[in-house]
Image (tube, rainbow, N blue to C red):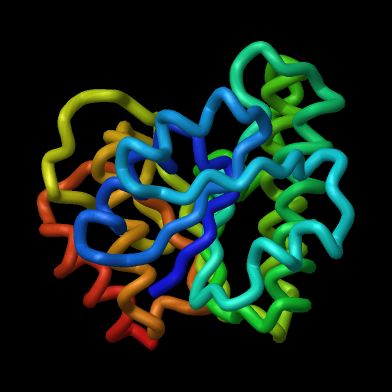
Amino acid sequence: MRIVIAGGHGQIALRLERLLTARGDEVAGIIRKPEQAGALLVSDTEPVVCDLETASLEDVVKHLEGADAAVFAAGAGPGSGVARKDTVDRRSAVLFADAAERAGVRRFLIISTMGAAHEPPPDTEPVFAAYLRAKAAADDDIRARAGLDWTVLRPGRLTNEPGTGRVKLAERTGRAEITRDDVAAVLVALLDEPRTAGHTLELINGDTPVAEAVSAVAEQG
């Protein structure tokens, strides 16, 4: 497959790129800064410099033409304020989805967050609340699109511990941690299983091997 990943320099994206290129897929990672390219080239991922906060729809469509799947893994990241939670976590996701539809790329995965399922409690720190609302709005936009075979993945609290290869993947899992390694492994399995389209899934570390967890979701229809 040819897979285009938005947020190609992110921690999950870099892991995903390594997994995909190692098995022979052609991968392009969209990055904001030319100096980020080296981290992608290590895994033979094609770096594509394109700032989704300022790019036109036509610019992004060009980068998606000929792809078999698109993965939105971008995020404003720690230290960003309320405004960038909207411009990156919501608007850039919507732009990327628009471009995927225009380019005819039906398979679309988005990395969301578990807290996006509900309105943040009143005492939530304002920037984090803005992040949760932006993620929820992006998810809602993408799930309303008939032109995409979408899957929304909502991981629990991310860690950099080594992956276990065992997870809990379901519509509701309860809150817990998940390693970034295991998120990347689940994304690969989701790309390989078209029957997971139309699902919004929470993900935490668990007892079920990744392939079995994804197959179980697919068999639910």
Q: Is residue 219 visible?
A: yes
Residue at left 31%, top 75%?
A: 192
Q: Viewer-proximal residue, 40 or 83?
A: 40
- Relative horizontal placement of residue 143, taking residue 99 as reference (left or right): left
Place residue 22 in its image quadrant. bottom left
Q: How many dots with numbers?
A: 0
Q: Viewer-proximal residue, 104 or 143?
A: 104
- Relative horizontal placement of residue 180, taking residue 138 as reference (left or right): left
Q: Which percent across, then down, holds residue 149?
A: 56, 80
User: Is residue 70 shown above or below 18?
Assistant: below
User: Is residue 37 shown above or below 134?
Assistant: above
- Relative horizontal placement of residue 193, taking residue 105 as reference (left or right): left
Q: Which percent across, then down, holds residue 69?
A: 51, 71
Q: Which percent across, then down, holds residue 38?
A: 44, 29
User: The N terminus lies in which quarter of the figure?
Assistant: bottom left
Residue at left 23%, top 42%?
A: 205
User: The C terminus lies in which quarter of the figure?
Assistant: bottom left
Q: Which percent across, then down, holds residue 52?
A: 76, 44
Place residue 97 in its image quadrant. bottom right
Q: Is residue 112 visible?
A: no
Residue at left 48%, top 78%?
A: 197
Residue at left 44%, top 60%?
A: 201
Q: Residue furthest top?
A: 79
- Relative horizontal placement of residue 117, taking residue 24 as reference (left or right): right
